[in-house]
Amino acid sequence: MEPFVLAFIAIGLLVVLVFIIYLVDRVNAIEKETRQFAQSLHDTKEPVSVGPFAGLSSKKLWDAMTGRVPEGMDPSLLMEVRERYEMVLHKHIESIFQEAVKDGQRGLNGEPKNTKLITTLRGPVESWLPSAQVNTLYKCGVDSTQLPADQLDAVRAALDEVGQTLYSKALLTLAQPLSVNLLPRPVADVPALVPPSAT
């Protein structure tokens, strides 16, 4: 009888041991599949766009707009950013000019900065523009307050040229010359429309 009980216990222990080995193997297989699944998700996940400018700001934003696109950036996302960037560029140009006008009125001649924090409906973004164009914009603003009216045509021409340069570099179309809004001609200088003579 005793050998029969011992055999029964031995068989029971063997079954339990086989069952434990099976469970450990199964848990390892599930863990391996989970790791592979997580890795595949990580590999195929699209980069998350941060903010209205896909996480780009300052010189990186300017570089992306001027053709030096960050590696792996989706072209459709770049188009969305470009549509929003036009307003940023316009506001940045305007703010440099207006700052220079204020400085010129106070008799100051400061050092303009390349970067400005521009407020948009979707939140603030730091904008960057090249030094050469920033300095020209600033000089135009100061000159507009200090030069006599008969010398402002040269300032308007420089303003229009720098606007065209910046928009061209950013691969955007400038709808109208900068001087139209920033340094308009006095009403007396604008040619009046002559009505056709009655015949």
Image (spheres, rainbow, N blue to C red):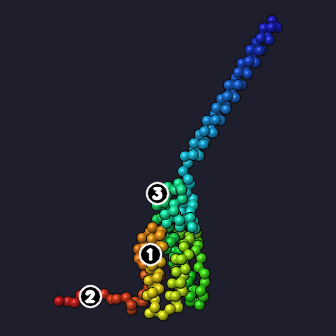
Does residue 52 appear anywhere in the picture? no
Q: Which residue is mark 3?
A: 76
How far apart, in angstroms, are the residues tagged by discs 1 and 3? 25 Å
Rendering quarter of residue 157: bottom left
Residue 151 in the image, given as x and y percentages of width and height = 46, 91
Residue 163 in the image, given as x and y percentages of width and height = 46, 76
Rendering quarter of residue 101: bottom right
How far apart, in angstroms, are the residues tagged by discs 3 and 2? 49 Å
Question: What amino acid is at disc 2?
Answer: Pro
Give the number of callouts.
3
Residue under the image location 47 percent in, 78 percent down? 162
| Camera-side mark, 3 or 2 | 3
Q: Is residue 141 left or right of residue 19?
A: left
Question: What amino acid is at disc 1?
Answer: Gln
**Helix, strand or loop under label 2:** loop
Q: Is residue 162 left or right of residue 198?
A: right
* Marking on residue 195: 2
Q: Which residue is mark 1?
A: 164
Mark 3 vs 2, N-terminal side:
3
| Camera-side mark, 1 or 3 | 1
Mark 1 vs 3, N-terminal side:
3
Question: What amino acid is at disc 3?
Answer: Ser
Does residue 115 appear anywhere in the picture? yes
Residue under the image location 39 percent in, 92 percent down? 188
| Camera-side mark, 2 or 1 | 1
Label 1: few (<14), some (14–19) or many (≥20) C-alpha neighbours in 10 Å? some
Q: Quadrant of the C terminus?
A: bottom left
